[in-house]
Amino acid sequence: MEGGARLVSLPRTGKGRLIRRGPVPLYSQVKELLRERIARLRGGEHEQLPSERELARDLNISRMTVRQAVRDLIAEGAVYTAPGRGTFLATEEVTQQLGGLTSFSQEMTKRGLVPSSRLLEAESVTDHEIAARLRVQPDEPIARIRRLRLANGEPMALETTHLPLTLCPGLLSMDLERGSLYELLQRVFRLRFGAASQTITAEAARPATARLLGLTDGEPVLVMERSSELDNGRPFEYVLSWYRADRYHFAVRLVPSRQA
Amino acid sequence: MEGGARLVSLPRTGKGRLIRRGPVPLYSQVKELLRERIARLRGGEHEQLPSERELARDLNISRMTVRQAVRDLIAEGAVYTAPGRGTFLATEEVTQQLGGLTSFSQEMTKRGLVPSSRLLEAESVTDHEIAARLRVQPDEPIARIRRLRLANGEPMALETTHLPLTLCPGLLSMDLERGSLYELLQRVFRLRFGAASQTITAEAARPATARLLGLTDGEPVLVMERSSELDNGRPFEYVLSWYRADRYHFAVRLVPSRQA
DNA sequence: GAGTGGTCTAGACCACGAA
DNA sequence: TCGTGGTCTAGACCACTCA
């Protein structure tokens, strides 16, 4: 299958080094590889991926394996297919699938975008209204973290997160610009997430918000409010976010309530 | 492939009558068949589906085809798999809040508001893009219903609904201003609703929309797009709505993903 | 050891789009 | 006509579970 005197035939496709029989399935490696391509192609002339047959040939794998990768990327909203024409990058508008606690970082990465943050504020405050939402004492210290969230360096959202400091002592002095806050909470502070409630509405961007997001005053922004619980039902975060509506969509899948 | 003197070999599996080379893909028919099984199994002792190999054998199709059906059902949250054990019905309480298909009328009534509608248009049209979304032939007649939705006489939303007319013949000459369209579809046309996918974003109100909603040009409106299916998975409506963001917001409760 | 889902192969035919 | 994605086949090996 591989060895032998083949004319070099090296990475026609960027990085042809798939690992067979490893712990990571081939289709999963192909997905990763396609995400890199997507990131490179983004904004360029041809926002089209190589055909499935071409990928299969170049990577020396079966077309069905390539298809499994492509199917997943379609489901994640990263690409779309047009029968008879090919596979193309999805519009840059990000659609967040609501149906689990999705981290901004994960969401962007899935789309082939590079997430980053600009930390605007990280302080300990007391606020009895927020305290009530987090179900802690009114004078208990609360971490307030304001971040501008970017994708490929472009502003996507402005986010204010509130957490009871007792759940994550020392958080405010950690690096909050790199990586995912959720990842920190899970890994360092061993928090296990449960359910969350979100509401979504829209409003006209106020001057300060508009400036940060790169909009002009009054342009529509999506406003998301989220209250999240740990798996034991205790509230752990209250988040208020403003998303650029021209770059962000929310998606929900409604399962029918079942009755006989 | 089918004709000829084969020993009958009929429906071992309840309804084994898969149609080959028809317009409906085999895996799609298998999904439908599995949904029926799921409905029957629900609440019973063994909430487990037959193994993929067993289904493939009984239905006389390839296991990969069965798998495509199962994969889809996993993605839709209807079942889950446990390697080495089998395929099982998903827990019932995964049902997203915002329960089932929320009818505008029901929603308003729940909040103590009096819902009403002003019918703007009710016509039979053909539109191949909408037809594709509804998975009907491009030239099949489609009902297009545009309504202004009011609560206590105040404009709340502008709604354009598309339905395949074959599912609801005569609908366009019925009273669409009073009562709920969903109620009509269920009661008169005996449609049973299934899952739906919604996306939500925001945009600046265009002049015509703004006038109808009582806004000034450019004020933010929530844009909701919904595709709904019957309980057999067939699409039955495609709706595009514009909501006054100052009077409406969407709420979602996120249930943590289940495992083991 | 038998059965299960997860992955993978190397083909095939179809409908469709573009040239 | 040729290339594309969409579907389908009839196998295969793996890691895992359960008896």
Image: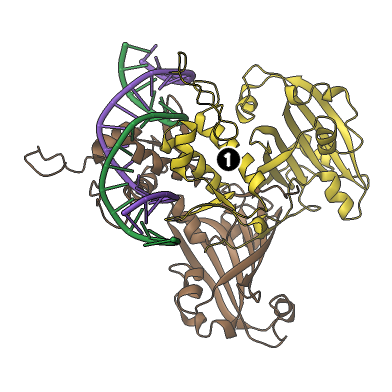
Chain colours: A brown, B yellow, C purple, D green
Residue drawn at point x = 76 percent, y = 42 percent: B217
Q: Is residue A170 left or right of residue B169?
A: left
Viewer-side residue, C14 vs B35? B35
Element under disc 1: helix
Q: Is residue B100 above or below residue A181?
A: above
Viewer-side residue, B59 vs A8? B59
Residue lying farthest left?
A5
Q: Is residue B196 left or right of residue B89?
A: right
Residue A1 picture location, percent across and down: 16, 41
Q: Is residue A243 above or below residue A185?
A: above
Q: Amino acid at mark 1?
A: Leu
Residue at which label 1 appears: B34
Residue B134 picture location, percent across and down: 64, 29
Judge the density around disc 1: few (<14), some (14-19), many (≥20) Cα neighbours within 10 Å: many
Q: Is residue B137 left or right of residue C7?
A: right
Q: Is residue B44 visible?
A: yes
Q: Across the whole image, how many numbered discs are drawn on residues? A: 1
Q: Chain of mark 1?
A: B
Residue drawn at point x = 49 percent, y = 32 percent: B59
The answer to which image quadrant residue B111 occupies is bottom right
Q: Is residue B198 visible?
A: no
Q: Is residue B208 left or right of residue B61?
A: right
Q: Is residue A16 above or below residue B169?
A: below
The answer to which image quadrant residue B209 occupies is top right
Viewer-side residue, A258 vs B15? B15
Residue drawn at point x = 50 percent, y = 26 percent: B9
Residue B190 picture location, percent across and down: 80, 32
Residue A142 picture location, percent across and down: 63, 81
Q: Quadrant of the N terminus of chain B?
A: top left
